[in-house]
Amino acid sequence: MRQKFKRIVVKVGSNVLTRKDETLDITRISMLVDQIAFLHKKGVEVILVSSGAIASGRSEIHPHKKVDDIGQRQIYSAVGQVKLINLYYELFREYSIPVGQVLTNKESFGTRRHYLNQKNCMTVMIENGIIPIVNENDTIAVSELMFTDNDELSGLIASMMNAQTLVILSNIDGIYNGSPDDPSSKILREIKADEDISEFIQVTKSSFGRGGMMTKVNIAQKEAKEGISVVIANGEKNNILIDLWNDCKHTLCTHFLPSEEPVSNVKKWIAHSEGFAKGEIHINKKATDLVNSDKVVSILPIGITDVKGDFEKDDIVRIMDDKGKQIGVGKAGFNSDKIREAMGKHGKKAVIHYDYLYIE
Ligand code: GLU
């Protein structure tokens, strides 16, 4: 596993970072920092995606004026994030390792320019030995603007930063093949990127964080398909990161094996941008068959039957087949009006170039 640990994203959930009374578990955080510092000194480039802001703010602030649910989340995250990052800062300083805070939101993954700015920010941090500590900017991300959870965010970060490994630390040892409460259940040790394991997934969520097992598995398989090795392990276990680094095979965890087929960076971005799509492009049967074949094809106006929504050039759009089913996503080469004008006509430029087309 060591060779796969050149650049890793470590995601730590709220349950790992907080005690039962919701205060930050300083002992545990300190142990995690020890392990990350060890890996850092070994030359591993670590990006930490840390939850825990809202949980830690909740234990700190008791608003004396009436605040609705959204307001509470905003207050807790604003206050809690300061506490959290301050703690990391102090703990890493003991090792003379500088850290920096990266707060992001869904919108910043939807626009290629924002995406590249974020990527550049974290790249220069890593190049300068600074560990990026990432969280969602929960002060402005509310309702539909939110990531599903920090598992989703960690997947996006792993793809964006071309990490070889994503480690999701939760409070269980991995994915069980039955109920975790049943003593005969066992941890699934290795899962292929395209293996169907939905029958094993518990729908229960962790108590503090937003994440559940289903999102973890979905994200893990999506990342594994892109060639990233994903590990789900127990962050409450002492030395878990070092054990994984030393010998992943013999450490209790679920390992999603990376697929061998490489995916280009821009396609990775497009694949993850589905949630930010601004419109739809419907294509006919002939075009559907072509994009589903092994051939390298772009989407041309002649194959388009409908354009839904108003979007700009370079926005992400969904690709719908002749039965109206989504088959992929792509980056629009023209705005929606121009595509409507060209739709059904011969000899026009590609609307979605092959390089910017991701078929699922
Ligand atoms: N961003 C949230 C926080 O720091 C956590 C979201 C999640 O639980 O996945 O509190």
Image: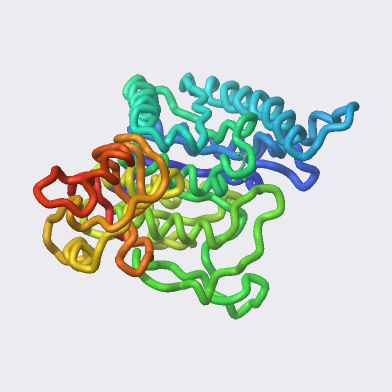
Q: Position of residue 65 (x, y in %)?
A: 89, 27
Residue shown at the point (59%, 44%) measured from the top left: 144
Name the foreground residue: 241 vs 283.
283
As drawn, is 159 to the left or to the right of 83?
left
Q: Position of residue 333 (x, y in %)?
A: 24, 39
For the image shown, how many numbered marks are present on the structure?
0
**Up/down of 268 relative to 220, above or below:** above
User: What's the image's color scheme?
Assistant: rainbow
Q: Quadrant of the C terminus?
A: bottom left
**Up/down of 106 relative to 236, above or below:** above
As drawn, is 220 to the left or to the right of 173?
left
The quarter of the picture where residue 125 lies is: top left
Name the foreground residue: 357 vs 269.
357
Which residue reaches farthest bottom? 184
- Image quadrant of ligand 1 equals top right
Confirm whether residue 323 shows in the render.
Answer: yes
The quarter of the picture where residue 8 lies is: top left
Confirm whether residue 258 shows in the render.
Answer: no
Residue shown at the point (16%, 45%) measured from the top left: 350
As drawn, is 45 to the left or to the right of 185?
left
Which residue reaches farthest left? 347
Name the foreground residue: 276 vs 129.
276
As drawn, is 18 to the left or to the right of 321?
right
Residue shown at the point (67%, 72%) measured from the top left: 181
**Up/down of 48 relative to 129, above or below:** below
Residue shown at the point (17%, 55%) measured from the top left: 302
Which residue reaches farthest right? 64
Q: Position of residue 223 (x, y in %)?
A: 37, 53
Q: Position of residue 38 (x, y in %)?
A: 44, 35
**Up/down of 22 relative to 84, above or below:** below
